[in-house]
């Protein structure tokens, strides 16, 4: 007889209670409507918007041994989960695949986080990326091969309905002058592939901003997760191999104006988390889902 928490399949590790290995959630512990954030403190702040009990039960909370922090409850009676994943495309990959594995029906996932900008947006504005590209370090360049130092992928689109709903909600709350849409660049580093200079390392990134904007003039934001969310949504399948089963969008607070090097203050972040958080929750409720198997 299997011992508690024993894992028998290395291809997709799930324990004998149905929990995935990294996020550590099992069926029934995560909703089909999910907000993903990086910072666990932000997940706790968003939890204040949720109905505090459902059928007399408190919010479900779980901190995994790999750093994923999950909260599940309801918002105006509709099941919603908040999952803090940390930073980077690999953490987004763990999260999307493992919540997909323990849910049935379609999913709606909105990333809410922070970003830098090279475009007209300013610190404190909100960006809803309608599509995203991946910017990744090309390691062969640094070993002497005649290749570019960075690879820039083709764009992958967000769910158009969710993005429009989200932008509309945000315009109502923030005003049209403070909400921007366009292309996002998801980078595999906070430093090199986001064009930051570091005298301790050779990064060959001084022309990266100009290359990005020349190739994609509508690029508005830089961060580290959104492309992976959009990519996995685009290749997700139903149990029978049908159309994509994950719908995805994102909203990001501009923390850094990379052309001027301006950076946001903490008081403004707290105010934005409240208004943008409510817009994200309202968008999730307005997104139609088939939650059947």
Image (cartoon, rainbow, N blue to C red):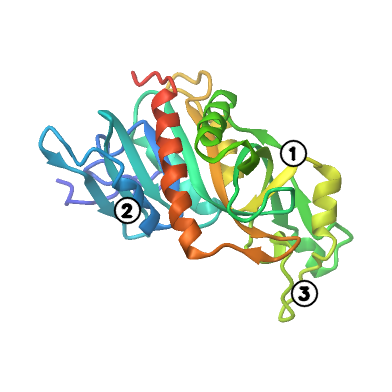
Q: Is residue 16 left or right of residue 114?
A: left
10 Å crowding of disc 2: few (<14), some (14-19), many (20+): some
Q: Is residue 249 visible?
A: yes
Of tags 1 and 2, which is closer to the observer?
A: 2
Q: Which residue corresponds to mark 3? A: 202
Q: Nearer the viewer, residue 45 or 155?
A: 45
Above or below — where is 25 with respect to 67? Answer: above
In whole angstroms, how far apart are the C-alphas of marks 2 and 3?
39 Å
Label 2: element kind? helix
Label 1: element kind? loop
**Residue under the image location 54 percent in, 42 percent down:** 251
Q: Nearer the viewer, residue 104 or 272?
A: 272
Q: Which residue corresponds to mark 2? A: 44
Q: Locate residue 81: give its quadrant.
A: top left
Counting residues from the start of the chain, the first of labels 2 and 3 encountered is 2
Q: Which residue corresponds to mark 1? A: 154
Q: Is residue 47 left or right of residue 55?
A: right
Residue 55 in percent (x, y) is at 12, 32
Label 3: element kind? loop
Q: Residue furthest bottom?
A: 200
Q: Quadrant of the C terminus?
A: top left
Of tags 2 and 3, which is closer to the observer?
A: 2
Q: Are marks 1 and 2 in contact (CB under 8 Å)?
A: no
10 Å crowding of disc 1: few (<14), some (14-19), many (20+): few
Above or below — where is 21 with respect to 204? Answer: above
Q: Is residue 161 left or right of residue 277?
A: right
**Residue under the image location 49 percent in, 43 percent down:** 111
Counting residues from the start of the chain, the first of labels 1 and 3 encountered is 1
Residue 217 in percent (x, y) is at 81, 42
Residue 7 in percent (x, y) is at 29, 49
């Amino acid at each position: 007889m299997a011992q508690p928490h024993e894992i028998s399949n290395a291809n997709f590790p799930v324990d004998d209670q149905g929990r995935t290995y990294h996020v550590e959630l099992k069926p029934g512990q995560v909703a089909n409507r999910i907000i993903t954030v990086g910072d666990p403190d932000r997940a706790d702040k968003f939890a204040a918007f949720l109905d505090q009990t459902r059928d007399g039960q408190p919010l479900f909370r779980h901190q995994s041994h790999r750093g994923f922090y999950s909260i599940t409850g309801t918002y105006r009676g509709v099941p919603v989960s908040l999952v803090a994943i940390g930073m980077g495309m690999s953490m987004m990959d763990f999260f999307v695949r493992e919540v997909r594995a323990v849910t049935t029906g379609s999913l709606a996932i909105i990333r809410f986080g922070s970003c830098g900008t090279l475009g007209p947006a300013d610190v404190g504005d909100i960006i809803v990326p309608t599509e995203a590209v991946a910017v990744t370090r090309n390691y062969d360049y640094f070993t002497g091969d005649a290749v570019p130092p960075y690879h820039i992928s083709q764009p992958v689109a967000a769910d158009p309905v969710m993005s429009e709903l989200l932008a509309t909600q945000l315009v109502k709350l923030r005003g049209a002058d403070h909400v921007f849409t366009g292309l996002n660049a998801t980078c595999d580093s906070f430093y090199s592939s986001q064009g930051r200079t570091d005298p301790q390392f050779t990064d060959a990134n001084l022309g990266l901003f100009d290359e990005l904007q020349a190739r994609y003039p509508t690029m508005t934001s830089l961060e580290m997760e959104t492309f992976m969310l959009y990519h996995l949504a685009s290749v997700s399948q139903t149990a029978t191999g049908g159309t994509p089963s994950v719908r995805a969008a994102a909203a990001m607070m501009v923390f850094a104006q990379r052309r001027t090097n301006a950076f946001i203050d903490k008081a403004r972040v707290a105010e934005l988390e409240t208004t943008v958080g409510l817009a994200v929750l309202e968008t999730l409720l307005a997104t139609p889902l088939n939650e059947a198997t």
